[in-house]
Image (cartoon, coloured by chain):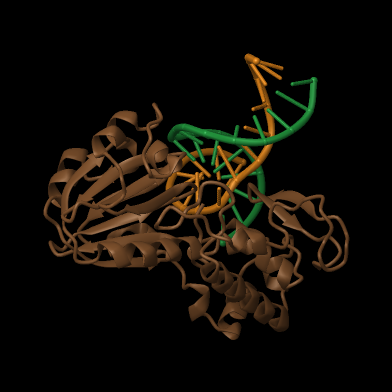
Chain colours: A brown, B green, C orange
DNA sequence: CGGGGCTCCTGTGCGC
DNA sequence: TGCGCACAGGAGCCCC
């Protein structure tokens, strides 16, 4: 699911709600999403921990606690964090008992109950729920998130890159531009949707070899990457399928997509049918006429 | 270094 | 109606 704009939307929503609150108890409904430490230690170390910050780095979230520990949450394809206020008419016992099974009359949206995998109970009666349809996401409770290889090898986010730097980096690469944009050690935070959208807006073919882009093309591509990411944040993320913001609501960025998931439809610029091919194992939509 | 394929999972939508 | 298959916002790993 979530690329930089979706993760940033969730971060902002959740941060507003859980900052300075203390975890009383952690319920784990799907143990496989907890990667470290072991479940028992994971729960014990979070008991009575107070949230001091909620950060986002590329597509990962880091919740910092007053006991010095970092909870690193990578949502992967279908993960999410939803804050459930104490005033929501939810019987937590019903929630536990019906997780993914019986349907009971509660005010919480069905997806959250159905796909809840971990529940953090907070000291004011509210809850932070980790949801994940496919369970590909990962939660880690560690001393310092910077120890993880993921963060050590993470490239700069687009907002911190300038045209010349981006061009120079592209010049060193001989791979297909589309796959390079998905490489987090090359540029951080971009995923399939925003890569495809940025390439369309920059009129660059996803098949181009990175070091063939001119300085002008590189600048335009970087500009469009920043633009689509900013738009994504403005419209609170792309809700293609399971993505929800930190309150369980859909984002409307999907309405602004120009090519993603539009194969067969007319290009909005030239009217040519949008094509879809597989690049780097991912579906890639583009206009064969506009994108050169 | 890079590309391709596979893996971790579950759900959905389509064609037959 | 039902079954099987393809595919889905990510990323690590292995092999060539």
Q: How many labels, in total?
A: 0
Image-based side of A289 in relation to A39, left or right: right
Q: Position of residue A265 (x, y in %)?
A: 81, 53
| Location of residue A91 with respect to A214 vertically, above or below | above
The residue lying toward the viewer, choosing from B12 and A2, is B12
The answer to whether residue A177 is visible is no
- The residue at 13%/50% (across/down) is A47
| Location of residue A224 with respect to B5 vertically, above or below | below
The answer to whether residue A71 is visible is yes
Q: Position of residue A270 (x, y in %)?
A: 87, 66
- Work out which quarter of the rendered image holds the C terminus of chain A and state it: bottom right
Q: Position of residue A14 (x, y in %)?
A: 34, 61
- The residue at 81%/55% (across/down) is A274
Residue A95 falls in image quadrant = top left
Q: Position of residue A9 (x, y in %)?
A: 44, 64
Image-based side of A179 in relation to A286, left or right: left
- The residue at 74%/49% (across/down) is A277
The residue lying toward the viewer, choosing from A163 and B11, is B11
- The residue at 46%/69% (across/down) is A155
């Amino acid at each position: 699911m979530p690329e930089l704009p979706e993760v940033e939307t969730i971060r902002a929503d959740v941060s507003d709600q859980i900052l300075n609150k203390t975890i009383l108890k952690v319920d784990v409904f799907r143990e496989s999403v907890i990667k470290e430490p072991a479940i028992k230690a994971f729960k014990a170390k979070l008991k009575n921990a107070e949230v001091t910050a909620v950060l986002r780095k590329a597509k990962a979230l880091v919740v910092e606690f007053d006991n010095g520990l970092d909870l690193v949450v990578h949502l992967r394809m279908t993960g999410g964090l939803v804050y459930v206020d104490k005033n929501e008419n939810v019987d937590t016992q019903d929630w536990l008992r019906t997780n993914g099974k019986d349907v009971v009359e509660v005010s919480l949206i069905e997806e959250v109950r159905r796909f809840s995998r971990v529940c953090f109970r907070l000291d004011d009666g509210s809850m932070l729920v980790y949801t994940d349809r496919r369970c590909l996401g990962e939660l880690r409770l560690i001393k310092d998130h910077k120890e993880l290889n993921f963060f050590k090898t993470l490239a700069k986010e687009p907002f911190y890159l300038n045209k010349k730097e981006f061009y120079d980096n592209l010049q060193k690469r001989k791979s297909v531009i589309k796959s390079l944009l998905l490489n987090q050690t090359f540029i951080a935070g971009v995923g399939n949707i925003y890569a495809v959208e940025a390439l369309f807006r920059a009129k660059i073919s996803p098949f181009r070899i990175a070091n063939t882009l001119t300085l002008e093309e590189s600048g335009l591509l970087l500009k469009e990457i920043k633009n689509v990411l900013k738009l994504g944040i403005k419209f609170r993320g792309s809700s293609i399928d399971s993505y929800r913001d930190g309150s369980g609501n859909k984002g409307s960025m999907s309405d602004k997509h120009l090519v993603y998931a539009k194969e067969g439809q007319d290009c909005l610029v030239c009217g040519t049918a949008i094509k879809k091919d597989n690049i780097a194992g991912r579906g890639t939509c583009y206009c064969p006429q506009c994108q050169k």
